[in-house]
Amino acid sequence: MALSAHFPLLQRIAASLRQLGWRDSAWLAVARLLARVPRQRCALYRYQFVAQAVAPGSLCRGRGRNITVTPCLAEADLPPGPVRRPGVLRARYGQGAQCLVARHAQAPAQMAGWLWLLRHGCQEDEVRARYALASSQSSWDLDVWVAPGQRGSLVFARLWEEANAVLHAQGVRWTCSRISRFNPASLAAHSRLGTHGLGTATFLRCGRWQWMVASLPPYLHLSRHPGDVPCLAFDTSSLPHYPSLELTCRILKQ
């Protein structure tokens, strides 16, 4: 019998080290310990920020026509989807966010996936932070979600195909986003899209106190009340080149 069968904890640690590396695995262990604090008073988040090129053209090359992607302009019109904290979706719409919703022709009342776009920066959902965009040719995307039964299908590709069309028509050439450093699947998916790294940030929250350490200005920040929000600015005009977007459905599949 394998050693891991006797020691499941060692198996989980080995898998974490393999997927995340020792540094993020150590941060993840701390995050899990803090999650045990009663009433969710403490939490730790670690983010990777990336920029992805926006270009016109079909990513699916005509495939996936049975998957429609349309904007949903109001929270009340969203079909049932993933559960988010109370008030989060309302706050997104309040910032001017646009939600692209994917549906299958066979089940138009059900959500197959969604992707959110914010044209002028973003107020973070999980921590006290504001993300600003220095270039008018940049946008922000967040919370790309595909229904569990549709992962590995063309839903993910169709969402990005429509997002590229919408953003390019608005003059956007780069879309920025943040990814949890504890989510190897999302990190891998974005890596396949050919993203550029923009920096990292770690947030520790305990009660009303929040500490931030980031690789970009203001680098360090201590917040003691909800109105004290650090702002991280991202300037895509400094990126070295504009890469061609020669993506296929095979690459985009989750």
Image (cartoon, rainbow, N blue to C red):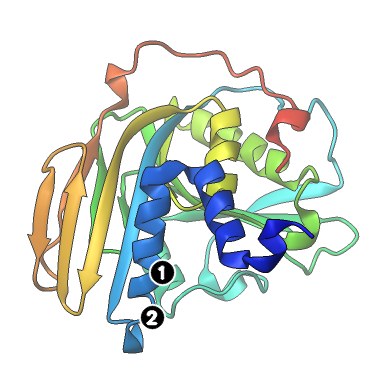
Numbered circle sitting on residue 36? 2
**How many marks can you see?**
2
**Quadrant in which residue 188 is drawn:** top right
Residue 133 appears in the picture as rendered: yes
Per the image, the residue denoted by label 1 is: 32
Position in image of residue 231 (x %, y %): 17, 49
Label 1 to label 2, Cα distance in Å? Answer: 7 Å
User: Left or right: 88 with respect to 192?
Assistant: left
Position in image of residue 197 (x %, y %): 38, 30
Of 40 and 23, the residue lying toward us = 23
Q: Secondary structure at mark 1?
A: helix
Which residue is at 46% across, 53% downward?
182
Quadrant that contains the C terminus: top right
Position in image of residue 216 (x %, y %): 19, 36
* Vertical placement of residue 34 versus 62, above or below: below
Q: Secondary structure at mark 2?
A: loop
Residue 72 appears in the picture as rendered: no
- Outermost residue to the right: 106
Which residue is at 77% across, 30% downward?
250
Identified by mark 2, the residue type is: Arg
Identified by mark 1, the residue type is: Arg
Q: Are marks 1 and 2 in contact (CB under 8 Å)?
A: yes
* Vertical placement of residue 238 versus 16, above or below: above
